Image (spheres, rainbow, N blue to C red):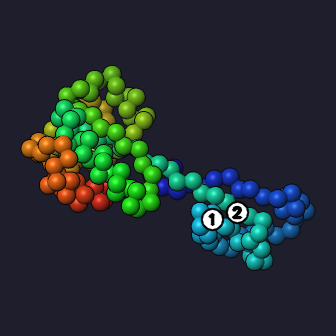
Amino acid sequence: MKGGEGAGLARCSHQDRKEREGGASTAFATLRRTTSLYTWAREDGDVSLWDVELKRVMMRYLFLCGEGWKRSPTAVTVARELAARRGLSIEAESGGIAHLRPEAVPHLLKRYDAFVVMERYMQDELVRRGVPRTSIVCLGIPDRYERNDQELVKILEKKLATVVR
């Protein structure tokens, strides 16, 4: 499952396996969060035999600006910092739409969950090249900022707050 949490494999003891094979009740009533483990509690209250560790699926973002030198590297830095503050793990890379070869698009579609572009024409160009519009986020940030410009950082913090999850 992309972008969320998916169930990992259950670890259970030999005794629990025997209970299941013997027909004993193993119905589950609740899922409780305990540190990094999610514990399945059986209806009879026994929680010692079932611990399921849920793995967070890392979101993968490609940030694109015109040349890949100013806005998109700054956006990667801001996105990583935002994710770290939220306790999330993301993969984020940057590039320039001017350097994007058409034959690279199929590979990029497999590699990234979301394409974050700075301007509308970049979104249109990606759609023209076969990227689904639903995979693209346009931030609407014009090309008038230098890399790591403080005004750009503030704008990105605000706009990426709803993008990075």
**Numbered disc total:** 2
The residue sitting at 38% across, 56% down in the picture is 83
Q: Is residue 37 above or below residue 79?
A: below
- Residue 93 in the figure: left or right of residue 66: right
- Residue 105 in the figure: left or right of residue 121: right
Q: Residues within 10 Å of mark 2 (few under 14, many from 20)?
A: some
Place of residue 86 in the rendered image (x, y in percent of width and height, measured from the top left): 40, 62
- The reply to whether residue 140 is visible in this rendering is no
The residue sitting at 74% across, 71% down in the picture is 47
Q: Is disc 2 placed on a helix, strand or loop?
A: strand
Name the residue tied to disc 2.
Answer: 51
Q: Is residue 19 above or below residue 29?
A: above
- Which one is nearer the viewer's eye here, 78 or 62? 78
- Residue 160 in the figure: left or right of residue 108: left
Amino acid under disc 1: Tyr
Place of residue 56 in the rendered image (x, y in percent of width and height, measured from the top left): 52, 54
Place of residue 104 in the rendered image (x, y in percent of width and height, measured from the top left): 34, 25
Image quadrant where residue 125 sits:
top left
- Which one is nearer the viewer's eye here, 69 or 62? 69
C-alpha span from label 1 to label 2: 6 Å
Place of residue 155 in the rendered image (x, y in percent of width and height, measured from the top left): 18, 56
Mark carried by residue 96: none
The residue sitting at 48% across, 55% down in the picture is 4
- Which one is nearer the viewer's eye here, 50 or 157? 157
The residue sitting at 82% across, 59% down in the picture is 13
Name the residue tied to disc 1.
Answer: 38
Q: Earlier in the sequence, mark 1 or mark 2?
A: 1
Q: Quadrant of the image for the C terminus?
A: bottom left
- The reply to whether callout 1 and callout 2 are in contact (CB within 8 Å) is yes
- Which one is nearer the viewer's eye here, 140 or 149? 149
